[in-house]
Amino acid sequence: MPSPDTAVRRTDYTPPAYLIDTVDLAFDLDPGNTTVTNRMRVRRNPQAAGAALLLHGQELELLGIEIDGAPCHDHRLTPDGLLIEHPPQDFELRLVTRCHPQENTSLMGLYVSNGNFFTQCEAEGFRKITYFLDRPDVMATYTVTLRADRQRYPILLANGNLAEQGELPDGRHYAVWHDPFKKPSYLFAVVAGQLVCREERIRIGSGEEKLLQVWVEPRDLPKTAHAMASLIHAIRWDEQRFGLALDLERFMIVAVSDFNMGAMENKGLNVFNTKYVLADAQTATDVDYGNIEAVVGHEYFHNWTGNRVTCRDWFQLSLKEGLTVFRDQEFSADMMGTESGRAVKRIEDVRVLRQAQFPEDAGPMAHPVRPDSYVEINNFYTVTVYEKGAEVVRMYQTLLGRDGFRRGMDLYFARHDGQAVTCDDFRQAMADANGRDLTQFSRWYSQAGTPRVKVTGHHDAAARTYTLTLRQECPKVGVEMLPGTPDKLPFHIPFAVGLLDTSGHDLPLRLQGDDGAAATTLVLDFTEAEQRFTFVDIDEPPLPSLLRNFSAPVIVEHEYTVDELAFLMAHDSDPFNRWEAGQRLATRQLLAHVEAIRRGELPSVDTFVIDAFRQVLRDDTLDPAYRELALTLPGESYLGEQMDEIDPAAIHAARQYMRQRLATALHTEWLAAYHNHQTPGDYRPDAASAGQRGLKNLALSYLSELNDTHVTQTAQVQYEHANNMTDRLAALNALVNGGQSAQEAASAALAEFYSRFEQEPLAIDKWFALQAMQRATGAQRVIDTIRTLLQHPAFTLKNPNRARALIFSFCAGNPAQFHAADGSGYAFWADQVLALDALNPQVAARLARVLDRWRKYTPALRGAMLDALNRVAAHQGLSKDVREIVDKAIG
Ligand code: TRP
Ligand code: ZN
């Protein structure tokens, strides 16, 4: 366990002793030594105690310090920064510091990527640029001067509006930027270098004209159209759905290829991983196009939810991230354009939640949406804060309705614009705007874990009623298991239900004692540990459709028969639950197969999944995108979570067995689907075309299970003639995972792909990732391929995208190979965590998390995993990022 003095606690929050009103920063940019002159107005905070001023600072060289124009001697450097013991009440502080961007491999603070300068300040990176009160509740107005060599750095960008620019002696030039909005330091950004932009002027609802720019390296300019279109859609959508308008004259997006995460919402100057900006038909897949739209939307939406109203402290991170993910999910859903498209988006989002967040919420890193303590805040940019946080926000909308949610948002901005606030402030605005008591709802913020809801139904023929009994439980997880943590209390769960009659139609629903109009879906206010809901006028035993549209982030347990699931799959009016029924059916069968395989038996050949899948595959009234999701088996990691003890090899064998069964039994149907969903003509990334490709390529991937030379030929032809990356990559995947008969073709295609895209880093990432996630063919071990690829000239640990493509894809995306019984995967993992930690602790800590569920595995694997964890933990000089993860994992 991390020693208590290194952990930061939510309840220890105190307001800052000083406030900073204005910051005037001047950068003399040079890759080796950059000098930063920082002039700021500082004053005592009337709301706070304490007289000393501790400015955060890391890896800085202090060259000068003046207070009100006179050299200051009353200061001292500490491990955390710069301490001024007795500053005046109100003064100007002038600091000159130096940093070393070229050597900065952490990609936090000021760094160099492909010869250009970038910054990343969230969460605590500004302190690597200058000494500052680097916390989100200190908000200031910034003016920034950038000076650099004109030839090497023709473009100089910072937040806000360009105030001035001009020439300097010695071939240098400068630009002055002013941001009129007060902001916390984490939203600060500068970018400088050889960049070009696509720009567009638009008029917003108020009639004002705005300048939009997407900045990239010159060769990437042709790949910026989709990002620009996405930005314009996002601006329009936020005005329409939430009445929120763009507040700056100019809004810029910049792409950078070395980046720790997806993108960053710096005020007026969003910085993006190239992966979430650049797209053209040849290099980006349909999924990439969708992700770009979502991330461009996400960062843009932060301008209100995060920037105009920000977080008081980092424990409130979900205030901006959960809310903004919810907003980007709704944006993407609306952009799908159809009801069935909305359902597809919802299913995809829930899959992410279940595959990544549910395991997190059951493991050693489990934490509430609003955590109570952390050692390293970067470790808390988690699927819990983001995705479960978005579900929590969605529940307000489910409880209050769309209009009620909008009233809550309006009140939130009316109250808090320009402030740094808490999750409680958001909840209070929702409550007050709707006259609702949301006190109990606050437990979604304070308690971790995924609640389980057990449901039983009882039909009373004489009384013509149907009663659902709901029981919720949520045992302690993660830090909640430490002694002294209070007992957990029931959650306020909006539980959406419908009841189907024997012909599959929705029954009109009315609760006993409620005389409102009947509806076909009711949202039950489920607030107690056990609660009964009685529906009246129900003549025959109905079939319940539970948790429609996944109305709360819980696990529903109900004893459905196989026939009932097949019935729901065919008839439920809620598209999410139709999909869900199919997944339950498949999961049940797959888990039985896993058990059989573990006993050394052959899986029994049941036909109910095959029949149900055949019906879906043949049903042309269903959207192809929806059918693709319905016909995709639950993932190996999701299946593992359903077991008491994870056995990755058995899970993989069971899933493969089922895929082969489905491939064989539905052979003609898959061939028909393949041929009927071609998309001739120019590539178009719209949802309908993407859906066609999705189903077609799923068909190809099932067919490739057959180890059949005809299929190999089909994949080869698709590979060669593809006019887009989606089809080319799907074909390559079918070849690489197509068994012995496809091996020669697979090698040839891999080589062709590499030479075709040698100059396209994002495509080469796909090349590494696809090989890292391949299945074993014959006796070949994938780990040997991985170790060979590590030596490939195109591989580097310094670029996070590349490291993720090879290392994370193998460790997290190829469970059957990674968990090889000989422990070779774990040894590789430990090597790479340590190597990465020396360069980039933030990324290393993400990789470290791959083993944090070790206790859930079979005994032999568990021991080997613990050995690997101990090896990392024993390393001297581990970053606190990785230290926190391995200490919590080992426990
Ligand atoms: N706030 C960013 C987002 O969600 C993510 C982010 C946080 C980030 N810290 C970062 C991005 C560090 C890059 C590096 O939109
Ligand atoms: Zn965000």
Image (cartoon, helix red, strand yellow):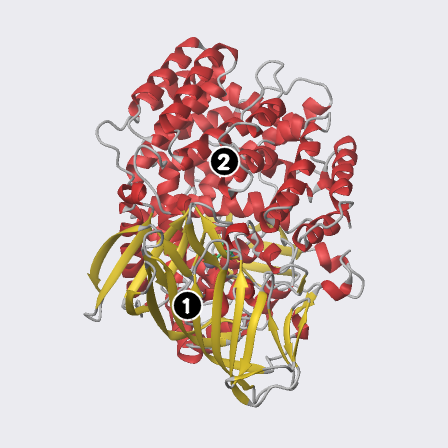
Give the number of the disc on residue 582: 2
Which residue is painted at 36% across and 25% down in the image?
Answer: 756
The answer to whether residue 125 of the structure is visible from this angle is yes
* Residue type, numbered disc 1: Phe
* Coordinates of residue 183 in the picture (x, y in percent): 44, 72
Q: Residue at x 54, y 55 (%)?
A: 388
Residue type beneath disc 2:
Gly
Which of label 1 and label 2 is nearer to you?
1
Percent coordinates x, y for residue 527 in the rendering: 60, 64
Mark 1 and mark 2 lie on one chain; the one further toward the N terminus is: 1
Q: Can you tell which quarter of the image residue 811 is in?
A: top right
Q: Residues within 10 Å of mark 1 (few under 14, many from 20)?
A: many
Q: Quadrant of the N terminus?
A: bottom right
Pick the front one: 493 or 20: 20
Q: Which mark is residue 405?
A: 1
Q: Residues within 10 Å of mark 2 (few under 14, many from 20)?
A: many
* Viewer-nearest residue: 322 or 879: 879
